[in-house]
Image: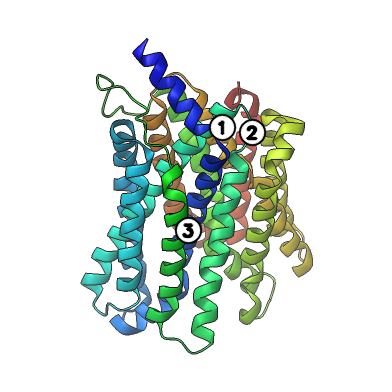
Amino acid sequence: MEMMTTLDARQASASTVATQHATRAVFFIAGIGMAAWAPLVPYAKNRAQLSDGSLGTLLLFLGLGSLVAMPLSGMLVGRVGCKKVITCGSLFILLALPLLATLSTAYHLALTLALFGAAIGLVDVAMNIQAIEVEKATGRVMMSGFHGFFSIGGIAGAGIVSVGLALGLTPLPAVTLVVALIIVIYAFSQRHLLTQRVQSDNGPIFVIPHGWVLFLGLMCFILFLAEGSILDWAALFLTQARGLPTSQAGLGYTLFSVAMTLGRLTGDRIVNYFGRTMTLFCGTLCASAGLLLAVCVPSITVTLAGFALVGFGAANTVPIMFSAAGNQQVMPVNLAISSMTTIGYAGILAGPALTGFISQCYSLTTAFSIIAILLLTVAASARLITR
């Protein structure tokens, strides 16, 4: 009877409109916090007098911090609830950003990037667990819309810092604008974050991903692998294979990001109309076709359109994966989400390296083609994933 009361209370709090808005706010905070670092990279490189190779090694600390924190986040959410984990992660983001804008030694930057990555990992897992709780409580498809706010936050974070720097601000004042915005948004939304634990005291603290959850993680790895490869290699492909001027090479990822954001903001309606299976099947098919179009047709316009298709097609695939992980019964939801997120995030880290290795042995065209084929395996598994 006590368990039922706790469950009913959790569902009641998760189903409120204020909780839904708070969930969107947290996704926005994660997006704006992560993206604010991107325009600061060249400044950090110059302050620390790093070579390209040293910078690449330094950036690994961000990913390592996230990979360590993601399993920890799932365990903590199970014990103390989403709100405390999101609060802790948000505070670390607020602490790390000003340091990343001012530190001038590789050692201190590495430690801060690890902290920053851990903060992003804590928030990422906790906000997705909260989103699943909200989606279950309301009985509505909402995951794509939540992830859409992450994408909007990404555009806002990079945009605010970039505009500030273009107007003559130094990195610290520029990133302070983002810090202030995060504080304001969090202050208005924190009271509506979920505080209930999602796991009983006698539940497992950690479970090695296996069976169904491991399969979902591997499918998520492919999706993130494609996203990471577009992020790091689209510009190079446009300049080397299509002859686009270096100053315009960012158009590929820009179109990819805009298309993904639009796809996610309309994704809940798409999933409601077509269903999760058809959306996942058509989305991964569209992303695969976009990549093949980009590499097979020697036209700048077609290549750019192909990258946009990848963004739109992939937009709702990861949100569907999170919903699938939330509905499985093999592992506790909090541990399943943290496991799948960790495996998937490894795809973003491995994507650039694997793409570069294949590109060096064969060509960048071959690397993108292999990723397109891998996306087809996700499409073929759509019915199984959404069962």
Query: Is label 3 in contact with label 1 (beta carbons under 8 Å)?
Result: no
Q: Residue 141 carries which label?
A: 2
- Which one is in front, 264 or 379? 264
Residue 2 versus residue 19 in the image, above or below: above
327 vs 267, left or right, is: left
Task: Give the secondary structure at mark 1.
Answer: helix
Assess disc 2: are there few (<14), some (14-19) or many (≥20) residues with their C-alpha within 10 Å of its C-alpha: many
Residue 160 versus residue 225 in the image, above or below: below
Assess disc 3: are there few (<14), some (14-19) or many (≥20) residues with their C-alpha within 10 Å of its C-alpha: some
**Amino acid type indicated by mark 1:** Glu
Q: Which residue is drawn at 42% across and 45% down?
A: 191
Task: Give the secondary structure at mark 3.
Answer: helix
Q: Name the residue under label 1.
A: 135
**Amino acid type indicated by mark 3:** Ile
The residue mark sitting in front, 3 or 1, is: 3
**Amino acid type indicated by mark 2:** Val
Q: How far apart are marks 3 and 2 (CA)?
A: 24 Å
Query: Is label 1 in contact with label 2 (beta carbons under 8 Å)?
Result: yes
Chain-order first, disc 3 or disc 1: 1
Q: Name the residue under label 3.
A: 185
Q: Residue at x 44, y 25 (%)?
A: 9
